[in-house]
């Protein structure tokens, strides 16, 4: 099923204009940051999965 929107992984903004084919993102363009790499967009579900993945959490020992 085609999602209503995608999330740009560069700037985390939703985008509503994209091409979806056979369950995958074929083309997308973020109007905010200009990202056009289909690999750098996620569906809402995929984005939530990434957010829950502790490998991508900030390192509390880095001091930033």
Image: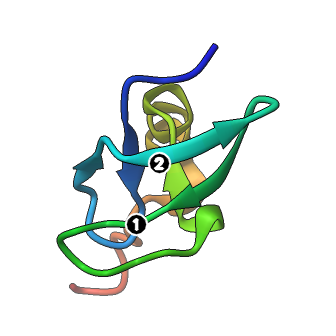
Task: Give the percent coordinates (x, y) of residue 53.
Answer: 57, 44
Of mark 1 and mark 2, the one earlier in the sequence is: 2
Give the quarter of the figure containing the N terminus: top right
Image quadrant assignment for residue 29: bottom left
Q: Is residue 54 left or right of residue 24?
A: left
14 versus 11 height, above or below: above
List the residue tagged with mark 2: 18
Judging depth in this view, the residue of 63 and 51 nearest the camera is: 51
| Residue at the (43%, 30%) spot, across then down | 44
| Residue at the (49%, 36%) spot, across then down | 52
Query: Circle 1 — which element?
Result: loop
Distance from disc 1 to disc 2, alpha carbons, whole Å, reads 7 Å
For this orientation, the residue located farthest to the bottom is 63
Give yes or no for contact between labels 1 and 2 (Cβ–Cβ under 8 Å): yes
Judging depth in this view, the residue of 53 and 22 nearest the camera is: 22
List the residue tagged with mark 1: 29
Mark linked to residue 37: none
Task: Give the percent coordinates (x, y) of residue 34.
Answer: 31, 81
Give the quarter of the figure containing the C terminus: bottom left
36 versus 47 height, above or below: below
For this orientation, the residue located farthest to the top is 1
Q: Is residue 19 left or right of residue 10?
A: right
């Amino acid at each position: 099923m085609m999602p209503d929107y995608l999330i740009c992984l560069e700037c985390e903004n939703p985008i509503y204009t994209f091409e979806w084919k056979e369950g995958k993102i074929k083309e997308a363009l973020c109007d905010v940051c200009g990202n056009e790499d289909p690999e750098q967009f996620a569906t809402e579900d995929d984005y939530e999965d990434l957010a829950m993945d502790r490998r991508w959490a900030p390192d509390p020992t880095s001091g930033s």
